[in-house]
Amino acid sequence: MLFIDDVAANTVNIPLEQWLLERQQFHAVSQLTFFKSFRQWKILKNWGNQIKSQRRDQVEEKLRSNLFILDDTFREILCSHRSRCITMERLRTVDLHQQERSSYSIEEFKLKQREVGERIKQ
């Protein structure tokens, strides 16, 4: 039997018995369920990947249109606002950590808040 290797353009002589054996093995392997259904599996897998990709693209587009932080105009405003909120939180304009008492009268609360306001001004 004559075998031509296209890659190296070499010819190889294979005995007929070996060729028949290899042919028989090839047909036996090709009859295995995995190899029989490989093309269908591959098509289904590619279709599933395509659907996932399309869904991901749709969600990405929705996020881009609805997330203001991605918009250049809104990004500055949102970051500035967040920075100011953090600053105010750190100033503790309302002292919720009352260690002396569990409750205050309105007048005591006003007095306490004035003290906090004076502390902030300094």
Image: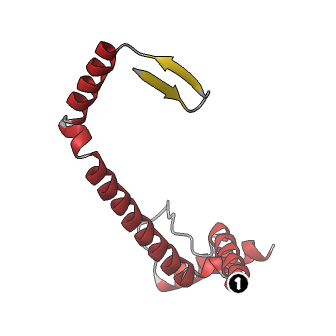
- Residue 113 placement (x, y as % from top left): 61, 79
- Residue 97 placement (x, y as % from top left): 51, 63
- Give the amino acid at mark 1: Ile
In this picture, is 44 found above or below 82? above
Q: How is the image coloured?
A: secondary structure
Q: Quadrant of the image for the C terminus? A: bottom right
Q: Identify the residue at image location x=74%, y=74%.
A: 120
Disc 1 crowd rating (10 Å Cα; few below 14, some 14-19, many 20+) is: few
Residue 51 placement: quadrant: bottom left
Q: Identify the residue at image location x=38%, y=58%.
A: 46
Q: Residue pushed farthest front?
A: 1
**Nearest the camera: 18 or 37?**
18
- Residue 50 placement (x, y as % from top left): 41, 65
In this picture, is 73 found above or below 83? below
Give the side of residue 120 with respect to residue 109, left or right. right
**Nearest the camera: 78 or 14?**
14
Q: Residue pushed farthest right?
A: 122
In this picture, is 106 found above or below 88? below
For the residue labelled by badge 1, is the local secondary structure a helix, a strand or a loop? Answer: helix
Residue 77 placement: quadrant: bottom right
Quickly name the residue at label 1: 77
Give the side of residue 34 with respect to residue 97, left or right. left
Q: Identify the residue at image location x=52%, y=78%.
A: 61
Q: Identify the residue at image location x=23%, y=46%.
A: 37
**Nearest the camera: 33 or 9?**
9
